[in-house]
Amino acid sequence: MTVLSVRNLNIAIPTGDGHVHAARDVSFSVEAEELFGIAGESGSGKSVLSQAIMGLLPGALISGEILFEDRDLLKLSPREMQQLRGNRIAMISQDPLSSLHPFYTIGQQIIEAIRTHRQTSHEAALAEAIDILGRVGIHDADKRVNDYPHQFSGGMRQRVMIAMAIVLRPALLIADEPTTALDVTVQAQIISLLNNMRREFGTAIIMVTHDLELLSSVADHAMVMYAGNRMELGPGNAVLRTPSHPYTMGLLQSSPTHESRGPLPSIPGQPPSLLIEQKACAFAPRCPSVMDICRTQRPPLRRFDDNTQSLCWLENKAVRAPAIAAAAEESAAASKSSDIVVSVSDVRLAYGARSLFSKGGGVEVLKGVSLELPRGTTLGIVGESGCGKSTLARIIAGLLPPTSGDVEIEGKSIIDLDRQSWVEMRKRIQMVFQDPFGSLNPRRRVGAIIGDPFRIQKVAHGDDRKNRVRDLMELVGLNPEHYNRFPSEFSGGQRQRIGIARALALNPSIIIFDEPVSALDVSIQAQILNLIAKLQRDLGLSYLFISHDLAVVRHVSKEIIVMQGGQVVERGETEALYHRPQHSYTRELLAAADPNYRKGGGATAASISEALTP
Amino acid sequence: MISFIASRIGFAALVLLLLSGFVFTLFFVAPGDPARMVAGERATEIQVAMVRENLGLDRPVIEQYVSFLGRSLSGDLGYSYRNQQPVIELIKNRMPATISLCVGAVIMWLCMGIPIGIMSARHPGSLRDRVGQGFVLIGVSFPSFVLGMAALYFLYFMPRQAGFTLFPPGGYRPFLDNPGVWAWHMALPWFTLALTSAAIYARLTRGQLLEVLGEDYIRTARAKGLSERKVIYKHGVRSIFSPLTTQLGADIAALLGGALVTEQVFGLQGIGSLAVQSVQTQDRPVIIGVVMLAGFFIVIANLIVDFLYIVLDPRVRG
């Protein structure tokens, strides 16, 4: 039975700069109990699409049809739509930390959802809320129902959101990036919970995500969107294993999950602006298989034997880009010398909670961490949020003094430096931060931002500084003519290049990357990772690479340490660690992140994979 | 929780103690001889010395301070130099007018400002929003003495010329005598003192509510199928109580300054005019009394704000 059928949907959102065309002629249908995946990068229109189905896009110009249980949602009055929302169509959103009201208990919020749509007593609704909380895996639900959202972890809050969404047994559940904000091990649990719930309650699920790997393991059908277009549609396995469209192929290949090391086959360029009226294929400027006709005429819809449909001029399925043979030369020069540039021994950090009138116990964030980084190599640091990896990075960079222990940079201790030697040390070690939006001052020009290290260290003045900044911009693949622009005029990937250029300015020997690509789209991620690898080869840099994403760390690192609860639980050569993990936590991380790993994994891995396979 | 409350109360007591020390020090470093002032211009040196001994001004400063603290705790703030009345009596006589003015004004500005802000935030950019924003601009542009004069002219003087009395020109009528007459007399002073703050609260409410309405949990509330009314009031407005409370704590502390001007314009015999008189005549016991009283109320207001925080935001409760 078809639950939802979207036909020729166009969505335009009026803004100050013109109409944003968030969806163009999109059609698809969702059957009862199926899990339908919508994949795409940011700006592809996937989230706008889900909000249009919920009727939560006031002011948008929407044409086409959204048939839900034989009614066209676009023709319903706001009142009728309101009666459907939360009742027949429910939604869970990306960030469980901000999606629950902080001032009401979870019980109050679930009861509110029940009593909005059903005439029932408070007591009956409370019993129902406790029952559903138990089903989504909240222990002691009868007590925890009176707790506030901040008393739950991120994963638990997402369970609460799921409970609230399915308590009225909706026919359709829209999950907009339901696991993106969660740690990998929790992601797997949430996905398996959603999977169980759709079977138990017969709910169809639309899962919107940028994570193709995730979709390929659970989606019955999948749709790939790009710049508001439905690029590809078909059975999940076919679309996500043997894609038809060059864009899907590019996305899959630029995820650093597959075995090959060396440069990733990235998709060049940036996604197009949605403000412009499209007359040709939106992907043409970035497509490796582009033909003349792609640039002038709209692509036709092609149907393939495996039931996939692709919006493309190519008559055959897209082909895998040839592997770039560059892996061999990687770090060949670097591994010759084996001197240690960063040496951390038994670093501890404890925060004490003290105030004027009360004294609390201290919290130990790092419990004796030691590591060594040989020159010219990359050491990956992996762990979930709260494991202390970013704190460790700050200590190594000299931005935070440890409670005890020692950090040596190129043989010199950085603890208790005088001002002069501290300034010297800052030239040797630099950081690149996670958030390319928050870590650049929006009111300063890019040239000034990149030139800051010169200004602070009082080297290179006037034209000399300007030329050096231009050289740096070229080195990281930015156009030197953009010297006078502001950060807001750059995309996320370009901003991260600015951050890298700033870090490179003083010829450091060590760069600490703190989640450098986790805020970027997959296709852009690959470009930045390639740049980082190229700079290491060309300049002989040593990297500390911090990430929660095992695939990314594996791709770039020679050695990896795994952190949990402020301690190093495992360390080793990258491949050895991946193929023969010793610690149970490492196995758990690997199992949660890598679908291929599940086949061979240990006990924990097997149990999670069992829950995952449909 | 209990330790938090205890620490806040302890902190409040500390603030009052420091304040008393500070005011008492000012009392001594300020130029002029209090004994001569009490004795009068034409008193002889012997008379002045007698007064000094009487008032205890010849004893060491620390001793005087300790006895001042002791007397203050038992409710004795000394006697006015000007007319020898007990300071506590003077303050008691002036309290009703000032309290009526301040409490009424706070209620009035909250009742004006918050609804206007909500109305603006619900329909940003609409005609209603622009009217609300216009009100804000007018409200913050008028100093209270201009506003008071304008209110007197248009709402008292002009109707009076036309032959009827719309509002009285001022003066305080006790609440217990006749609440209606009391409110009628307070209406113009309330409005004068409240308008600027009402405008500021309208703007604050609008800004905070617009921000909250963009939060993910508001989208969750809409996705649940709640009516727009419930989304706005139960989920949106609920979240802006905390920032409004913070602002209110700061404003109550600054209220006495505004009340002073308003009392002058409407001839209310309140704490504000008492403060002005005592500063003009260097009546130091009265100055100290008024400052301590103001400090006491500010500290209490902030204590209440801290407790309201605990009530309003479960995350503070921990």
Image (cartoon, rainbow, N blue to C red):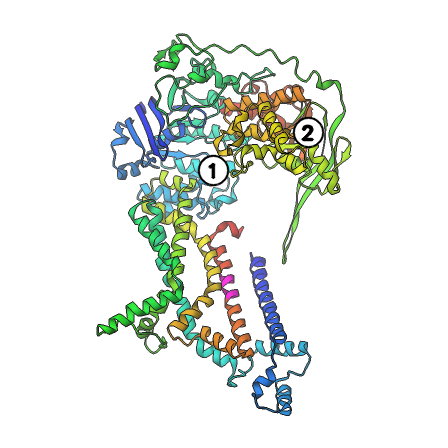
x, y percent for residue A607: 55, 25
Amino acid under label 2?
Answer: Pro
- The residue at 37%/56% (across/down) is B113
Q: In the image, is A409 to the left or to the right of B131? A: right
The spot of residue B41 in percent (x, y) is 56, 88
The dot on residue B307 is: none
Crowd around label 1: few <14 · some 14–19 · many ≥20 (10 Å): many
Work out how far the residue at label 1 is from the one at label 2, CA to CA, in angstroms: 39 Å
Please name the residue shown 46% across and 72% down the image.
B272
Residue A88: x and y, percent? 33, 34
The answer to whether marks 1 and 2 sit on the same chain is yes
Disc sitting over residue A96 in the figure: 1
Start and end of the magenta stretch? B298-304
Q: Is residue B69 above or below residue A49?
A: below
Q: Which numbered tag is attached to residue A508? A: 2
Q: Amino acid at mark 1?
A: Pro
A395 part of magenta stretch: no
Mark sitting earlier along the chain (1/2):
1
Pick whichever, A19 or A405, lies toward us: A19
Q: Main secondary structure of the magenta part?
A: helix
Q: Is residue B300 magenta?
A: yes
For residue B200, above or below residue A602: below
* Element carrying mark 1: helix
Locate the N terminus of chain A by quadrant: top left
> Mark 1 falls within which chain?
A
In the foreground, A202 or A313: A313
